[in-house]
Amino acid sequence: MSAPEQPRRSGGNWAVWLPALLFAGFLAVVAYNLSNPAERVVRSALIGKPLPEFALQAAVPGQPGLARADMADGKVRLLNIFASWCVPCAVEAPQLAQLKAAGVDVVGVAIRDRPDELQAFLARHGNPFTRIGADNVSKIQFSLGSSGVPESFVIDGKGVIRYQHIGEIRPEHVPLLLRQIEEAGQ
Amino acid sequence: MIRLLLATLALTVATPVLADGTMPPAPYAYRQLDNPAQEAAAKELMETLRCLQCQGQSIADSDAPIAGDMRHQVRERIAAGEDPEAIRAWLIERYGDYVSYAPQVTAKTWPLFAAPLVFLLLAGLLVRRRLTGKDAA
């Protein structure tokens, strides 16, 4: 190319640092996000919406299964999604017992569970549930927008999902859940 | 020696605590649909749905039981004649956009689609000004 050399514009020199600055900024963002990995929980988008229609068979003999029709009867309930193979589910058992003792009606959905293993789990960790439905292909879990076990949903008396708790209920979560349940009852 | 034998025995005989239970996977978790066209549609959809537990993977790639259950649900619904995009919409309604790998134009994402066009337009204007400027000079 035989283009004539452009005269140097005065004051244009600072611009040569711009790409380097941009790159430094990019590195800073990368470094920050590497040291602070985001906690990725997928929240249900159904909060404030009615519980989807479902009807589950009994998960253990001698205790009724769970259907939507059992829920929207004016009473607030805690719907707990759990499984006997899920270790954190055993961790939250005392807290579920505590909620039950506080007068909360706790209903369960057992994910991919065998009746005998479930019974052994309940015998060992206690059974706070008034009903347990068996969800063997996670169908109800998907329709609730739940992405793992354990998860708990506060369902109000009209069958509307009011609150989602992801992960095991630890002792410090009990007051919060009780407050959510109380609010759902108003 | 006895101790070693016992340890080996304990390791081989004892059943490990399975993280995901002992239930067999859902029927269509690892089985293709009999209708090839339907299976192709299911596969295409499964490749663009995020596994909820192993979030860097699609449900087609993941061996997590929950991904197997989701594949089962996708195949079952497609076999029942449901439109793949309707299944995607159903999942987005429950999990948000995050569950889908297929980019969607929404109120939040439209700048991503618009920005390249805007840049292209700006670059075009710039080039035109340069060219016409040179002509004038």
Image (cartoon, rainbow, N blue to C red):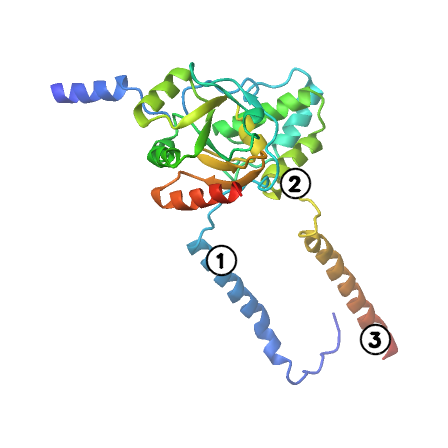
Residue at the right extreme? B136
Which chain does the residue under circle 3 lie in?
B
Helix, strand or loop status at disc 3: helix
Give residue A30's mark: 1
**Closer to the camera in the image, A147 or B65:** A147
Name the residue type under label 3: Gly
The mark closer to the camera, 2 or 3, is 2
Left/right placement of residue A18 relative to residue B136 reads: left
Q: What separation in Å lies between label 2 and label 3 (alpha carbons)?
A: 43 Å
Q: Are marks 1 and 2 in contact (CB under 8 Å)?
A: no
Q: Name the secondary structure under disc 2.
A: loop
Return the mark for residue B133: 3
Q: Is the C-beta separation of discs 2 and 3 under 8 Å?
A: no
- Residue drawn 45% across the image and 51% down it: A37
- Same chain for labels 1 and 2? Say yes or no: no
Q: Which residue is under mark 2?
A: B102
